[in-house]
Amino acid sequence: MCSGITAFNIKGIRTALLWAVFCIIIAFSFREAHLDIRTLADGLPYAAALLRDMFPPNFYALEKILLLAAETIAMGLWATIIGIAFSIPLGLISAKNTSPNVFVYTGGKLLVNGMRAIPDLVCALIFVTSFGMGPVAGILGLLIPAIGTLAKFYAEAIESIDTGPVEAVRAAGSHGLSIIRHAVLPQVFPLFMGYNLYMLDHNIRAAMTLGLVGAGGLGFELFRQMRSFHYHKASAILVIVFLIITVIDRLSSYLRNGITDGTFLNSRGRLKDWSLLSVFCLITGLSIFLVPVSLREIVAGIPRIRDFLSGMFPPDFSPIFTDMKLMLETVGMGISGTFIAMLIAVPLGMLSAKSITRSPFIYNITKEITNFFRAMPELMFALIFVAAVGLGPFAGVLALALHTAGFLGKFYAEAIENVDPKPVEATEATGASFLQIIRHAIFPQVSPLFHSYNLYILDRNIRASTLMGIVGAGGIGFELVMSMKLFDYRHTATLMIIILTTVMLVDWASSYLRNKVVA
Amino acid sequence: MLCVEGINKRFNGRQVLSNLNLRVGSGETVALIGSSGSGKTTLIRTINGFVVPDSGRVAIQGKDIDYRNREALRQTRKRIGMVYQLFNLVERASALDNVMSGALGRMDRGIHLLVSTVGFFQKEDRDKAMDVLRFVGIEDKANERVDRLSGGQKQRVAIARALMQEPELLLADEPVANLDPKTGRKILELFLKINVGKGITVITVLHHIEAVRDHFRRVAAIKDGTVCFDGKVDELTGDHIDYIYKSDRNLECAAA
C-alpha cells in the first residue's frame, strides 16, 4: 500500500516535469519560428485573394504539362532503379550477419547513414551546380538519399531473418554467396519489393519538387508560373501533381498489400508476377526514352563535382554563429510544424477511423481531406503560403503542419481502427459513455503508437524544414542556396556540416525515444 | 431479478436463440452449460445489450431493456457487471486504472463526465478501487501493468472492475476457460464469495461439469438456442449430460 502511494507520487512528479519540458520546448519553437497569430490574421485576405486568382485552373498548355509530368515520373523511376542496383550490395555489407568483416560492416553503415542524412533537394542543388539545370541533376539528387534509405531498410530486413534455413544451407557445406542466394534472398525478397515500391512512391513525390532548384520536371514550371503571378496556371499544375501523386500512392499501396498478403510474389501467382514484370520493363523503357541519361553527360560532370568538393575546403567557420542561429530557427520550425500537425491530426484521425465514426459521409469526407494534405508536397504548400503570408518561417511552418497532418491523420486513424476490441467492449459493458470509452479503452492502447508516429514525423519535419528556405519559407535553406549561387562553397561546407550533424542527431534521438515509448 | 421471455435471434440465417425463457431470482447463482455454438454467449450478450433479440423481452428488476435507446441501454449496463474469458483488460494500463474504469458509468454527468474524460478520478473512487482489489486479493499488484500479471491475477482485476460498478447482477462468459484448474477453482470460489458477501446475483457460462457440481446449486443447460434443463445440480444426471452434449457432437462430425 505504502509503496503504491510513493510509486504514484514519483510517477506524478515525472509526468508533471515531462509536461513542463514539453511546454517550454513548444513555446521556444513558436518564438524561433516567429509564429504570430497576427501574421496569420493579416495574411488571410491575401490568402483569399490568392485562392480567387487560382480558380478556375487554366490548363494553358496541357501537352507541355503532361510531357513534363511524364519526365518527372521518369526521374523518380530512374532514381529508384539505379538506387536498387547500388543498394543491394551496400545493404548486404552493412548487415551484421552477411557482412564479410567488422571493418566493412562499420564502413558500410557509416556510408549508409551519411547518404541517408543528405536531404534530396540539397543533393540536387549540388548536382545542378555541376551538371547544369535539367533532369540528370535531379535523378542524381534523388539517387544518393535513395541508396542510403534503401540500403538501411535492406540491412534491417537481412538482420531480422530466420537463422534456421541459413544454418541448414551452411550445414550442407555451401559457399558464402550461395548461402545468401538460397537462404537469405528468398526470405527477404517480398520485404525488398515492398521497400522498393515505397521508394518509388517517395521518389516520384520528391521529383515533383526538384524543379524548384532547377533540376527538371514539373516543379520548375510551377515555380515559374508562381513567380510571374500566373496563379490560375499554377493551380492547373497543382491539380496535375495532386492527381499523379494520388494515383501512384493508391497503386503502390495496392501492390504492397498484394505482396504482404501473398497475392503477388508467391509460387502459384507466377502469371501475375510475369505480367507485373513486363509492365515494369515497359515503364522502364518509357522512362529511358523520356529522360535519356547519357553516360557522357555524367562523366563530363565529374570534374566539376571534384571542383565543387575541393572548393569546399577548408570550410569557412567565420559565420558559424549566425548559421547556428538559423539552424535553431529551422529546428523550431520543425517542432512547431509537428505540434500544429498533431493538433489538426487528432480530430482528422478520429473522424476518419471507421470504428468510431459511424456516419459514412463524415468518415469519407475527412479521409479525402487527409489524403489531399498527404498528397500535396510540402514545398508546394510552402510556395502557396509564401504568396499568402509573405516570406519567412511562418509560411514554412504552415506548410509542414498541413502536409504532415495528412500523414499523422492517416496513421492515427489506422491505429484507432486496429485497437483490440475486447477492452472496448468491456468498458462499454460497464455503462461508460462514448467519450469515456475513447479515453479509457482506446487512448491507452494507441498512445504509444501515437508517440512513435509523432517522433517519426518530428524527425522528418526537422529534415524537411532545412529545405523550406529554398522557396523563401524560412530556415537555413535560403542561406544554403545563396552560398551556392554566390560560389561561396567554403560557406556551403559549413552549412552542410551543421545540417548533416543536426539531422543525424535528431534521427538518432528520435529512434532512441521511439524504442523507449513503444512498450 | 432477471426475466428472459421468448427471445429469438438469427445470425446469417442461423437460428441461434429460439424461444428462450429463463428466470433468475435475486441472490441466486446460476451456471449455464451447453456445447459450443448452443447460444450461451449470445444469451449473455443479450442480457447486457450487445445483441439485440429479434423478438421477445428481457427484463431486469421488472423493467424491460429498451434496446433502441442508447442512453437507457447505458443505464442498464451500469447495473450489470461482466467478466470475460480473455479478461478484456487494457493491457498497458495498471491494474488500478483498469479497475477504476468500472466507475465510469457512474461519472456520467456534468463535471464528473468532463473530469473522467480528461482522465482523472476522485479520491474516493481510488480508495474504493483499492478496497475492491483487496477484496479480490491482489491489492499488492495495484500499480503493476496488467501485461505483467498472470492469467489468474488478470481475471481478478477483471472481476474487481466489474465489482467497481457495484452491480446487481454479475455475468461471466467462461471466466475460467483460460486458466489452469487450480486457479479456476479459486476464481469460482471468489464468485461465491461475491454472491454471499455482497448479495450480487451471478450467472456464469461454464464448461467444466465437475466445477459446476462443486460450486453451484442451480444449473441451466442450453441446447440449440433454448433451455433444455433447468434445475438443481443434484438432479442433473449422466443421461441429461449425454443429451445436452450429444446431438451437437454428431453435428460437428457431420460438419467435419
Image: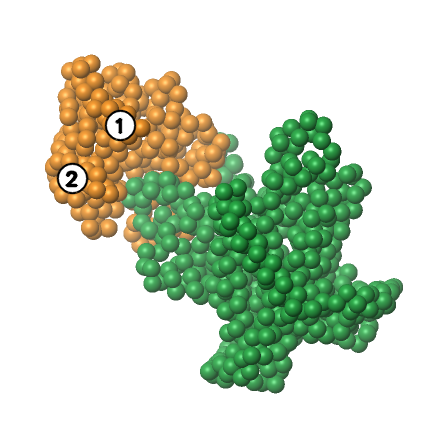
Chain colours: A green, B orange
- Mark 2 lies on a secondary structure that is strand
Q: Vertical placement of A25 versus A40: above or below? A: above
Q: Nearer the viewer, mark 2 or mark 1?
A: 1
- What's the residue type where badge 1 is placed? Ala
Of B200 and B40, the residue lying toward us: B40
**In x, y percent, where is residue A330?**
66, 65
| Same chain check for tags 2 and 1 | yes
Q: Is residue B197 visible?
A: no
**In x, y percent, where is residue A255?**
51, 53
**In x, y percent, where is residue A42?**
52, 80
**In x, y percent, where is residue B229?**
15, 23
Q: Residue at x 19, y 30 (%)?
A: B224
Q: Residues within 10 Å of mark 2 (few under 14, many from 20)?
A: many
Sequence-first tag of 2 and 1: 2
The residue where tag 1 is placed is B254
- Chain letter for mark 1: B
Q: How far is the residue under mark 2 from the one under mark 1?
A: 25 Å
Residue B82 placement, left or right of A245? left
Q: Residue at x 23, y 33 (%)?
A: B39
Of A103 and B124, the residue lying toward us: A103
Q: Is residue A241 visible?
A: yes
- Chain letter for mark 2: B
Of B169 and A157, the residue lying toward us: A157
Residue B106 placement, left or right of A474? left
Occupied quadrant, residue B215: top left
The residue where tag 2 is placed is B8
Q: Residue at x 64, y 76 (%)?
A: A220
Residue A287 placement, left or right of B248? right
- What's the residue type where badge 2 is placed? Asn
Of A281 and A256, the residue lying toward us: A281
